[in-house]
Amino acid sequence: MNLLRKRRVALSGLFFLAGLSFASWASRIPDFQQHFDLSEGQLGTLLLGMPLGSLLALPLAGWAVDKYGSRRVIVAGSIFYAISLLSLGYTQSIIQLGVAVMFFGMMGNIMNISLNTQALLVEDGYQRSILASFHGLWSFAGFAGAGIGALMIQLGWAPVYHYWVVSILMLVILGSSFQLLFKEEKRTGSGGLVLRKPDALLLRVGLIGFFGMMCEGCMFDWSGVYLKKVVMAEPHLVPLGYVTFMAAMASGRFVSDFLANKWTKIVMLRISGGLIFSGLLIAVAFPSFISSVIGFLLVGFGTASVIPLSYSIAGRSKMYAPSIALALVSTISFFGFLLGPPLIGFIAELFNLQISFAFIAVMGMCITLLATVKTDIFFAYKKNADSLT
């Protein structure tokens, strides 16, 4: 196995463990709700700490990676990510848990920026698109984490012992992997935190990510509700909408690199937006169980490549260092994840849930339009961005 291949394997393990850590927390949320006797509203408020922490970490992550290099930040971030996971298990009050959740969200996004910056270096070495496969491993880790969580619950293990197992595994893998990571030799010296205006290219890519994350948030939070309230599916069938979406998104990320190399990243973004639009439109126009699940399957395949390809394009910015560009695009994209789910609820309150899903379908089409409408800045860059494919 050559050195570049070893670097890819090492980084793949770190992406998987980052996803496993997040899934380990998510799989035990019901335990925390029961332990602290939280109402649904209190739990919802508590869970806002994670996206808030993630958002606060973005400028810090971009600056740290730009100044110290992704390799160093991955090492420090992995250690603190493990500590933040453990801190969740040791909380004794709701306030402590809220602070721990925010800290966990911050560390998760620091890992996100540093891992993706390192992934761009590996992708440069391969001279072709491979970023989506890393994201596929993160998504696949969600299934593994859910399975491990179910096993721990079955064994009667408290979350803290569960988290010790995951944290030790993360540090062991880190110890065997970090020496294989690229060590950047040059620093751009941003001179401060990443609080700046994106250029026209990063704004457009950020908006593509914004609409993609809005669609993801819709499926994460509302796919089950749609099957229950609109489709009137049997209770045991309701989770299949979310599972189908997640399976399609995870598997789609393993094939989107191949397709991006064949058709270019820009074309793949156009197709992705079309799949999201078509899938949601099928679910809205034909609100039966089979058609809705087929629609959610298409949405999963559509969302699979939006964020990885957006990051890959942003990382080739001529104005900013990769970490800065990723932080800027991530910030814009992340607002879609924050705004999407509550916006769906607001529209559903005014009209109905089908209208909400039709609105999100239009957001999917916006991805296609943003990747299609010609502007000098975007298509002058397109040739360079797709040169790796």
Image (cartoon, grey):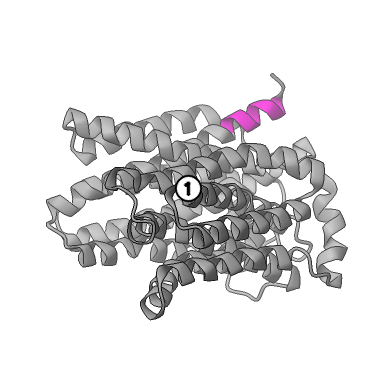
Q: Residue at x 58, y 73 (%)?
A: 195
Q: Residue at x 77, y 53 (%)?
A: 267
Q: Is residue 158 left or right of residue 330?
A: left
Residue 239: x and y, percent?
A: 35, 46
Q: Is residue 261 left or right of residue 62?
A: right
Residue 78: x and y, percent?
A: 45, 43
Residue pointed to by mark 1: 293
Quick check: is 301 in the magenta stretch? no
Give the tally of numbered discs.
Answer: 1
Image height check: is 90 above or below 149?
below
Main secondary structure type of the part rendered in magenta = helix
Quick one: 298 or 55, which is closer to the camera?
298
> What kind of element bears circle 1?
helix
Report whether residue 127 is seen: yes
Residue 101: x and y, percent?
A: 31, 57
Image height check: is 249 above or below 103?
above
Q: Magenta segment range?
A: 3-10
Q: Residue at x 33, y 47 (%)?
A: 26
Residue 336: x and y, percent?
A: 52, 67
